[in-house]
Amino acid sequence: MHRAIALFLLLGGCASLDKAECLNADWYAIGLEDGARGRAVERLGGHRRACAEHGIAPDTQRYLAGRGEGLKSFCTFQRGYSQGRAGQAFADVCPAELAGPFAAGYRQGRDLYELHRQLASVQAEIKKSKEALKEGIRDPRARAREVERLEALAREAETLEGEINRRPSN
């Protein structure tokens, strides 16, 4: 059991396996890890190529069984939400029976991510506008336009903040 956990952790960040790892691989555990991380089934091809260099073939059935089990922990509303909220690309790896909750969570998280991006952009524009006013726009009309622009930006930021605050934080 400890050996499987060690291998599980070892494989987390690498794309290929060495000879000893291929010889002693627990393909179920490797698939479980890949599934739990939302990795595409093509990841098995990388393992296959790495082990082929040593004349070893992965146990595809065990890998796919483990990956399927791992996907159960990945393909959840909460994981989809956190992926979307972090601005990550949509991971289209979930089987049909698990895809709905993951996609719904992803959309909610991605919507919130986009609102935060818009707010950051507006806040950057507010900062530029304040700096322009602070530096002293001499033309009264130009200054009035910049004040109006700043007020509009402040209203937009307030609207975005309100929308963000109305969203569930999951």
Image: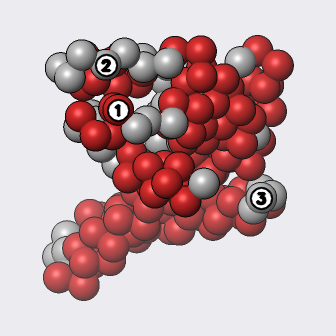
Horizontal relation, residue 165 to residue 31: left or right? right
Q: Residue at x 24, y 16 (%)?
A: 55
Q: Looking at the rendering, which quadrant does residue 50 occupy?
A: top left
Q: Looking at the rendering, which quadrant does residue 124 occupy?
A: bottom left
The label shown at residue 23 is 1
**Crowding at mark 1 (Cα within 10 Å: few <14, some 14-19, many 20+):** some
Earlier in the chain: of badge 1 and badge 2, it is 1
Q: Identify the residue under disc 3.
A: 170
Does residue 143 sit above or below 8 in this rendering?
A: below
Relative to the observer, which residue lies in front, 64 or 20?
A: 20
Alpha-carbon span between mark 1 and mark 3: 42 Å
Amino acid marked by disc 2: Ile
Q: Residue at x 20, y 23 (%)?
A: 54
- Label 3: state its secondary structure: loop
Tell me, yes or no, whether the two marked residues, 1 and 2, touch with CB atoms within 8 Å: yes
Alpha-carbon span between mark 1 and mark 2: 7 Å
Residue 111 in sight: no
Tell me, yes or no, whether the two marked residues, 1 and 3, touch with CB atoms within 8 Å: no
Amino acid marked by disc 3: Asn
Q: Position of residue 26 (x, y in %)?
A: 51, 36
Amino acid marked by disc 1: Leu
Q: Position of residue 132 (x, y in %)?
A: 23, 73
- Label 1: state its secondary structure: helix
Q: Position of residue 52 (x, y in %)?
A: 25, 16
Q: Identify the residue under disc 2.
A: 56
